[in-house]
Image (spheres, rainbow, N blue to C red):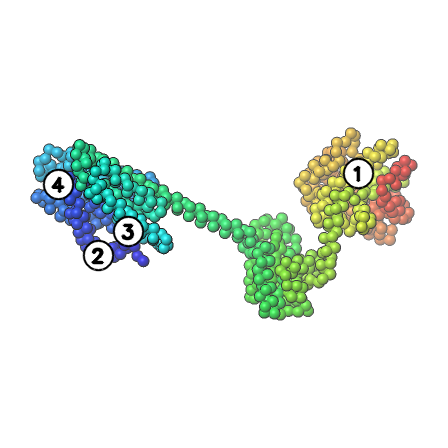
Amino acid sequence: MQAPTALIREVPYAAQVCLVAIAYFVAAQLSLSLAIPPGYASPVWPPSGLALAAALLFGGRIWPGIWIGAALANITVEASFFSAALIASGNALEALAARALIRRYVGDPGAFRRGEDVVKFILLCALSAAIAATIAALALAAGHNTLDGFRNWWTWWQGDATGMIIVAPLVLSWCVRDDAAWPRQKKLEAACFGLLLALTVYAISADRASHFAPFSLTFVSLPFIIWAGFRFGQREVASAIAVVCGVAVWYALERRELFASVPLNELLLMLLTFISMVVATGLVLAVVVSERSRATEELRRKHERVASQVQKHAQYDSLTGLPNGVLFLERLAHLLQAAGRSGGKVVVAVLDIDRFKNINDMHGRHVGDAVLTQIAARLSGEPNGGIVARISGARFAVAFPGLEVEGGTVAALADEKLARWFGAPYRVAENELGLSVRMGLALSPDHGGEADALFMYAESALQRAKTAGDRYLLYTPKMSERVAERLSLENQLRQAIEREQFVLHYQPKVDLDTRQVVGFEALIRWRSPELGLVPPLRFIPLLEETGMILEVGSWALRRAVLDQRLWAGEGVRVPRIAVNVSPIQLRQPNFVERVEEAVGPASGPSLIDLEITETHIMADIESTIDKLTRVHALGIGIAIDDFGTGYSSLAYLARLPVQTLKIDRAFVVRMVDDEEAMALVQTIISLARSLKLTTVAEGVETEEQADLLELLRCDQMQGFFFSAPKPREQLTGLLRAG
């Protein structure tokens, strides 16, 4: 439905001019009945409001219609055509000036946006009304030679000003299209509003009400403005204002006997003040309520947008735009239900990109992000549809509906999918990257019909594939058994920490020349009430994987220091103790602080060494050099464990604060029969001597090995040839003897 303004604008320009002229003339004739003095001016001149509304609606080119209507109206009361033409020119100029000022400083009076715009509108109307009043006063003075020019100017100015501030917003607000349809309840309220307002006007205009004090009954109609302001809009408020102001003017003119003692100019000033207050209060109230409603609606929309964004972030990956794990499981549940009804199968796959961290480290995170985005695009481009999600980091999940596959054909399916997704290299800028991936698969209904279970089974298959070195594996029930065993062991380890079930066993380090004990290596053992004495290879990897090694490693340091104090209290020689450090511990930013806290303040030189595997030292060499230098400054020795198995640079080795190199047992065991192993052991010993480092041979099991190491001038040895790892109490006698 078109707004009234749009319909009128479709009318030809000449017809618009004629309509405005007729409307102005008719309104002027009706308003002349309110003239003070008769024939000249009115306390409210509605034609000025119509003229302003026409100028704002149709633009400045409508001025001929205003001029013609004003000229015809003035000819009916003025014998002089010159005076009528001059007054009509003033009316047209007044409308054009008001239009220009209002457009610049206010906007659209048909829909005020702010309360201050209402005040500006009233002031600009009052300012513009001075134009027509001044020209009219001059015309009347010239035509009638009157001496009461100021009174004519005043009444003319008041009539035009009040006419503009009452009528223009009324006309313009009714020309604004209202797209919001009123509900039935609001229509009923509007009908009651109009009926009660009409009854109020009737009551005020009744003859019986004439004995009331001046204006007293007029104020009875003011609550309707408040009602309209809070419950409706500017259009209804403007209508109520027009009624209230009309009643006030009529009351002042028709009940003239009530104002017999009031001079005419004071009566006009009272009317002007009353009308200005009513218009300002009513329109400001309507605008403020409307502004508050808009603000509330904007807040509601913002809340909905924020809620939508929060929901999106909670269910979608911000980088790739794929669903996350939560949404994947929801959609997988729906997919499984549909497949269950149709009797189809669903394959669930979880994929993990091998060594993806290397891409970020070598090429930058922006390249890694671009690769992840391309992976998401390839996974999402499946012709058979399905569900794709980014679970975490470089891990994705995929589910395929309606695939008629059996266990024997899953391999062909996996090969085909992996070739499609990762067969071609990924290109980012100038980089061409080939990716290696592991995948675990689960099949519905073979492995179950629950989304959570299938996803867990696919993850179990993925972990097994990574452990076994396979590209992909299909889930088997034995995998769940292994997962259950692992979870049980993890829970037992947490209880072991809480119940202090870990103990230290010590393996002696022996000087090859004197065959005397010079130190110990501390080795963690777990004394489980259910499992007995658990070997370290069964639980150390799980401690590292779960991060519990941080707590257990700190405990081992504290326990070693405590055992040294116990030996000192027993009056025996206190040995140096080497404690192994996990790579998880070494990577912690607060590694040095953890070591310092565990060792505690020393009353003398520290007798603690830290053993770190060569491979782990070289993983982040610059950071490692900084941390180990600070640890060595605490008086703690540093030993490189399993030396010869990594790829240490001699330049880095010279910078490391190392005092000991430990030769890996694999070389020691083979050196008697393997010339290459012998040459490597001899090279390590020579290198250590050139750098003034101590060498310790691990895994010495025979007299022949010990004699050969002594011949090669190795400093120390440890292994079952001399002693297996034992509890502290069993080694006290050895220290007394040595």
**Is disc 2 surrounded by few (<14), some (14 to 19) or many (20+) residues within 10 Å?**
few
Nearer-the-camera pick, 351 or 183: 183
Nearer-the-camera pick, 343 or 373: 343
What residue would you read off at disc 3? 175
Mark drawn on residue 484: none
| Alpha carbons under labels 4 and 3: distance apart | 33 Å
Examine the image and state in which quarter residue 737 appears.
top right
| Alpha carbons under labels 1 and 3: distance apart | 91 Å
Counting residues from the start of the chain, the first of labels 2 and 1 encountered is 2
What residue would you read off at disc 1? 560
* Residue 307 on image: x %, y %: 50, 50
Counting residues from the start of the chain, the first of labels 1 and 3 encountered is 3
**Is disc 4 surrounded by few (<14), some (14 to 19) or many (20+) residues within 10 Å?**
few
Labelled pair 4, 1 in contact (Cβ < 8 Å): no
The disc labelled 2 sits on which kind of residue? Pro
Tag 2, which secondary structure?
loop
Residue 672 in the figure: left or right of residue 419? right
| Mark in front: 4 vs 2 | 4
| Mark in front: 4 vs 3 | 4
Residue at point 20%, 43% (across, down): 207
Residue at point 13%, 39% (across, down): 37
What residue would you read off at disc 4? 38
**Is disc 1 surrounded by few (<14), some (14 to 19) or many (20+) residues within 10 Å?**
many
Residue 455's place in the image compared with 297, above or below, is below
Nearer-the-camera pick, 109 or 610: 109
* Residue 517 on image: x %, y %: 87, 39
| Alpha carbons under labels 4 and 2: distance apart | 37 Å
| Alpha carbons under labels 2 and 1: distance apart | 103 Å
What residue would you read off at disc 2? 12
Q: Point out the image quarter for the N terminus.
A: bottom left
